[in-house]
Amino acid sequence: MIYLDNAGTTKLFDEVIKLCNDMLSEYFFNPSATYPSAVKVAEMINLARATIAKELHCLPEEIYFTSCATEADNWALEYGRKLKNGNVVISAGEHAAIYEAAMRLKSKGVEIRIAALNKDGTVNIKDIERLVDKNTALVSIIHCSNETGVVNDISTISQIVKSKSNAVFHSDGVQAFCKIPVNINDLAVDLYSLSGHKIGAPKGIGALYVKRNMHINPLIVGGGQERGLRSGTENTAGIVAFAKAVEIFNKYCDREKMAQIRNYIITRFRNIANVLINGEEGRNSYFIVSASVFGIKAEVLQNMLYQDGVIIGLGSACSAKSSENRVLSNLGRSKKEIEGNIRLSLSPMISMEEIAVAMEKIEKNINVLRGKI
Ligand code: PLP
């Protein structure tokens, strides 16, 4: 099976599975306990925190583990706001974890302002400039789109936000982390969300970067874990596995190879009539290619490819079940184009040979669906 839905979730690295087993069977102790075995687990958590912090170029104490990035995003929106009654600016390209959290704030009376997307898939910076004012409490702009792979210029956006307001600036970094170089100081964000299962760690582990000295209230209260900001007994296996996955992802991730693979996919799509690559002109992650294939139903193509040993995505897993796709419609894609939208998302372990086989099958099945074979 050639698996091309890695932006949905990833297969765990073998080393990560082994480490999870060890954590669950041998190092199962509660890290809050005081006996030596438990202290050892607490140390393992802090080593993991340091690894993730190193990857982001931040301090270990700026990392708070959560149950997933959805929690981190919800936390940022709910409690990151400085002016409790101020407006909140997001973009039309946000993941549902931000978009729905913003809609919930709206239902509580918070004014939500939504910045438009450019044709190339990036967030319209002029629109952000127009929407942010001195009453803005928080701005949240996705770093790398889970739909198109387009990368937003977060540091420029941050400069604009900070020059116009005292707003807290959050970015969802789930699809950027480990996949494009991320230096939190250059991005100049206050909050940044991460997820483990997009890079070879298990599902159910995420993190929120909280800039030092920034005050944020906890979303979940209780036993005071994570220095009082995220209660709940730590997902010890998930946390340690997350850090291990970062190390292994980096070990296998050859950015040059990934660039070649992405270019190859795009070239192959260009040779098929009536295929539009979404966000092709923008700055892109090498790990996602989103293509609108005219005149077919993506779900049918997905089923045919599954039979042929290739798994592809239909867009983000959260929007895959709905015929509406908020992000792609905001890019100006028609209903017909969205119906034929597929998303190929890569892991660093993929080879050019596998991609060549997958593209052969994708082309063949598109031709079958179009009645050409
Ligand atoms: N943000 C983005 C950009 C994502 O792609 C995802 C996962 O699809 C999430 C947030 C949610 O992550 P999690 O599954 O860890 O809650």
Image (spheres, rainbow, N blue to C red):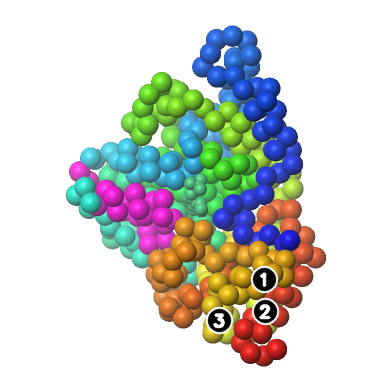
Q: Is residue 249 visible?
A: yes
Question: Quarter holding the N terminus?
Answer: bottom right
> Mark 1 CB in 8 Å range of ligand 1?
no
Q: From mark 2 to mark 3, how far is it between C-alphas?
A: 10 Å
Residue drawn where x is 48% and y is 70% of the image: 120
Residue 171 vertical placement versus 373 (above, below): above
Kindly identify which numbered label has been placed on residue 296: 3
On screen, residue 88 versus residue 65, left or right, reads: left
Proximity of marks 1 and 2: CB atoms separated by less than 8 Å:
yes
Residue matched to label 2: 365
The disc at residue 51 is: none
The residue at which mark 1 appears reads as 305
Q: Is residue 106 left or right of residue 23?
A: left
Secondary structure at badge 2 equals helix
Q: Quadrant of the C terminus?
A: bottom right
- Residue occupying the point 48% across, 32% down: 64
> Considering only order in the chain, which callout, 3 or 1, is on the residue closer to the N terminus?
3
Q: Which residues are magenta?
A: 85-106
Q: Disc 2 marks which amino acid? A: Asn
- Would residue 25 be counted in the magenta stretch? no
- Sequence order check, earlier mark of 1 and 2: 1
Residue 118 visible (yes or no): no
Closer to us: 138 or 303: 303
Q: Residue furthest right?
A: 353
Give the residue furthest to the top.
Answer: 35
**17 in relation to 147, above or below:** above
Residue at x 34% of width, y 44% of height = 77
Circle 1 — which element? helix
Vertical placement of residue 57 versus 30, above or below: below
In the rendered image, residue 89, in percent from the top left (x then y), is placed at 31, 53
Q: As shown in the figure, which amino acid type bears the numbered disc 3? A: Ile
